[in-house]
Amino acid sequence: MRPSLRIAAAVAGMAFAGCTRSPSPSPAASAVRIGAVFSLTGNAAAYGAQQKAAVQLAVDDVNKGNTLRGLTLELVLEDDGTNPQQGISVFDRLINANKVSAIIGPTLSTLAEAADPRAQAQKTPVVAVSNTKPNAITTIGDYIWRVSLTEAQVIPSALALAREKLGFKTAALLYGDDDAFTKAGFDVMKSALEKAGVKILGIQTFSTKDRDFDAQLTALKGLKPDILLVSALVEQAGSIAVQARQLGYTGPLMGGNGFNSTKFIQLAGPAAEGVLVGTAWNRASQEPVNQAFIAAMKARGTDPDQFAAQAYSGVLVIAEAIRQAGFKGGREDIREGLAKVKDLPTPLGRFSFLPNRDGDHLAAVQIVRGGKFEILQ
C-alpha cells in the first residue's frame, strides 16, 4: 500500500476509533473552507515550507479517507511574509473575502499576536500550530486554540534530561531580543535554569537581522560555561552554531524551538553535531499515524520536521472538531467541536486541549547525530 493510502486509512480509522456513531453530514454544504497562513518568505520561510507541505498532505488525506463522511476540506493558503502587517492583511482577506471557517497559523508568535485579534473579533477559530510563547496567544480570546506546546511545556523537561545526561552546573544564554518567539524561549530557559540551581554566568542578545555573532559568543565563551543555551530563529541558529565552534567553544549547545528544523542541520553542517533541543514531536514514535505521516511526507519529497508534524496535526484537530460538531463546518460549529477534542491520535501523540485551549501531549528531547535528529534516551 502506498504511503498516501496508508495514512488516509490511518486518519479515517483514528477519527472514529472508540467513538459512537455520529449523524450524517448536512446536505446543505459539501466543503469546509480552511485558511492556512504561514511564513513562506522572510526569516521564517524554512518553517513555512514544511508547514505548507504538511497541511496540503493532511487535507488530501482527510478528503481521500472520507474522514468527514461526504464533507471535504478546501484549503486556502496565504503567505504572511514573516511580517506582522502582512499577516494582518491575509487574515482579513481569509475572514472577510474567502469566508473561511477556521484558520491554521500563522508561523511565529509575533505574527499571531498581531493577526489573531482580527480573527477573535470576527469570531473565526484559529488553530495555532507553531506559536510557543507562554501565557500568550490563547489569552487573545476564546476563538484561539493552540496545537503547539509552549516553550514552558517543553524546555524545562528537556533541560532536566540534558542536565541528567551532562551534569552541567553553569550556563550562558544568547537570544534574539526583538522577536516574541525567541524572547519567550529565553524567558523560559532562564527561569528553568534558575529553578534547577544552574548558575547563569552571562547573557548576550542579538537582533533577528544579525548574522555576525562573534562578539557575543566571544564574551560568553570567555566565561567558560558548562553549557550554552540559545533561543534563535533557524537562520540565526545555524550561524550561531558554526561561529561558536569556529571560536573554539567545544561544550554542549542547547537550542530553543527555533532549532527544530532540518534546515538548522543543513545550515550548521558539522557544527550541528551534538546540539540538543526540546521537541514537541517524537519522530521515533512507532504509532501508525506517525509512521504513515513520515512515509507520506517523504514520498512527496519532504523530510518532515516538528513544524510539519504540528501543521499536519492541526488539520486532524480541525477535522475532529467538525466530526465532534456532528459533521457541521461553520465557525461556531468548529469552535464548539474543538472543545471536545480529546486523546486524538496524531503524529504528535494522543492530543487533547487543556482548559485554557493550549495543547496537551508528551514532549521529548532531540540530539543531532550523524547529521540527523535523534531522540535522546
Image (tube, helix red, strand yellow):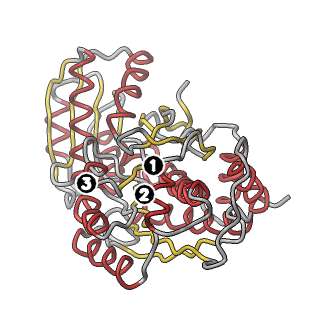
Residue 104 drawn at (x, y percent): 44, 63
Q: Residue at x 14, y 29 (%)?
A: 202
Q: Quadrant of the C terminus?
A: top right
The one nearer the camera, 268 or 30, is: 30
Q: Quadrant of residue 128?
A: bottom left
Instruction: Tell me which residue sits at (23%, 57%) in the image.
Output: 211
Q: Which mark is residue 216?
A: none
Task: Identify which amino acid the numbered label 1 is placed on.
Answer: Val
Three-letter amino acid code at the position of disc 2: Val
348 horizontally vs 210: left or right: right
| Alpha carbons under labels 1 and 3: distance apart | 15 Å
Q: Secondary structure at mark 1?
A: loop
Query: Where is mark 1, residue-wise?
Result: 147
* Label 2 neighbour load within 10 Å: few <14, some 14-19, many 20+: many
Residue 127: assigned label = 2
Q: Are marks 2 and 1 in contact (CB under 8 Å)?
A: yes
